[in-house]
Image (cartoon, rainbow, N blue to C red):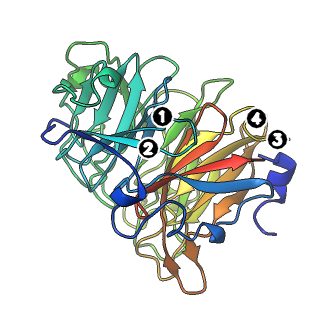
Amino acid sequence: MKYFLPLLSFLFLVSCSQKSTEPITPETVNGTHSWDESLPLETIKLPEGFKISVYAQAVENARSMSLSPSGTLFVGTRSKGDVYALKDTDGDFRVDKRYTIATGLNMPNGVAFKDGSLYVAEVDKILRYDDIESKLDNPEEPVLITDAFPEDRAHGWKYIAFGPDDKLYVPVGAPCNICESEDPIYASITRFDPTKVTVSREDIEIVANGVRNTVGFTWHPSNNELWFTENGRDWMGDDMPACELNRVLETGQHFGYPYCHQGDALDPEFGNGKSCSDYIAPVQNLGAHTAPLGIEFYKTGSFPGIATERLLFAEHGSWNRSRKSGYRVMSVGIDTEGNSLDYVPFAEGWLDEESDNFWGRPVDLEYLPDGSLLLSDDFADVIYRISYGE
């Protein structure tokens, strides 16, 4: 069983023009989707004792997620331009109420919730919806926190999250497949103090450089180290370069882009005269073109018998590889020094390797209070729940 004997030892918007709430029932589902019946969940392979179910359906283009302490799940989108709020009001682990917070935004992929407010990342802006849970039926116009980020749509969609320092972390992808930029804010992870009335470019601090495009990061639960997934460049072949799992040990580290990829491969165009030893190598090289996105550390108590520290992350899947790769949730074990122990599947089956066809694309991960794991899918337009022992 290729994918998880280790896991068995592990046994684990400025536009708000259309705001609405609607019950989610089989009658209101888009297309042919209906509860649990239209998606081939039986094809998803999980470690023994785990199961997958549909938590929310008809969530068009569901991308990044953020759960409030009271249980409201906020969901951003990329191509759709909407932001949703989802609620499971009867506690049966199926969303029965959906609110549209905003429509017509510019790729509002990133959402983050803190102190009663919802933060939403557009390409060049960060918006804040104050006291949002009391206004789900009719949200007020958001507060513009900043419009100081670049306007480039290439790798311009953002994942955002609050760090242990209470600052808001915001990545800025490279505005291209491969290029050098004179502006250091490109290909970086930044942060700023969101309590400022207006955040200017001067208030934005660069935490990490040489990061082509990250759409998922998290912090180690014990030492607060920042860990992130990174999407590798295109057009170096089917198997080059690897996407990456990285960690930040100190502010200002450079992770190689556009000069060095996967820790040991100089770029054919921009690597001349460079040395990969001058940059931070990945903790783990991932599959080429797998597009790793949302990432979470194993949450203590969620799944029994965990013997090692582990990370789970969604691989969205390749778009230009001759044979597709990714379309799964992977796991990396971490030792006490932060080194990788393994890189193995946790959940797979959205891609039929024989036919090379896929029916879903995992995006982001979020834990529910009971320890079960939510997984968004922007292709199947659903949010799954992965649980153990039920």
Residue closer to the observer: 111 or 279: 111
Calculate the distance from the C-alpha at mark 3 to the C-alpha at mark 2: 33 Å
Tell me the amino acid under the disc marked 4: Glu
The image shows residue 308 at horizontal and vertical percentages of 81, 41
Calculate the distance from the C-alpha at mark 3 to the C-alpha at mark 1: 31 Å
At x 35%, y 42%, the residue is 98
Tell me the amino acid under the disc marked 1: Thr
The image shows residue 323 at horizontal and vertical percentages of 52, 81
Query: Which residue, as the protein is rendered here, is positioned at the far bottom?
Result: 355
Q: Secondary structure at mark 3?
A: loop
Residue closer to the observer: 315 or 305: 305
In this image, 238 relative to 79: left or right? right
Which callout, 2 or 1, points at the residue further toward the start of the chain?
A: 1
Q: Which mark is residue 31?
A: none
Q: Which mark is residue 89?
A: 1
Which callout, 4 or 3, points at the residue further toward the start of the chain?
A: 3
Calculate the distance from the C-alpha at mark 2 to the C-alpha at mark 1: 7 Å
Tell me the amino acid under the disc marked 3: Ile
Q: Secondary structure at mark 1?
A: loop
At x 64%, y 66%, the residue is 44
- Report the residue marked by disc 4: 337
Calculate the distance from the C-alpha at mark 4 to the C-alpha at mark 3: 18 Å
- Report the residue marked by disc 3: 306
Which callout, 3 or 2, points at the residue further toward the start of the chain?
A: 2
The image shows residue 179 at horizontal and vertical percentages of 30, 57
- Report the residue marked by disc 2: 96
Q: Secondary structure at mark 4?
A: loop
Point out the image quarter for the N terminus.
bottom right
Q: Are marks 2 and 1 in contact (CB under 8 Å)?
A: yes
Q: Residues within 10 Å of mark 4 (few under 14, many from 20)?
A: few
Query: Which residue, as the protein is rendered here, is positioned at the far top?
Result: 196
In this image, 205 relative to 232: left or right? left
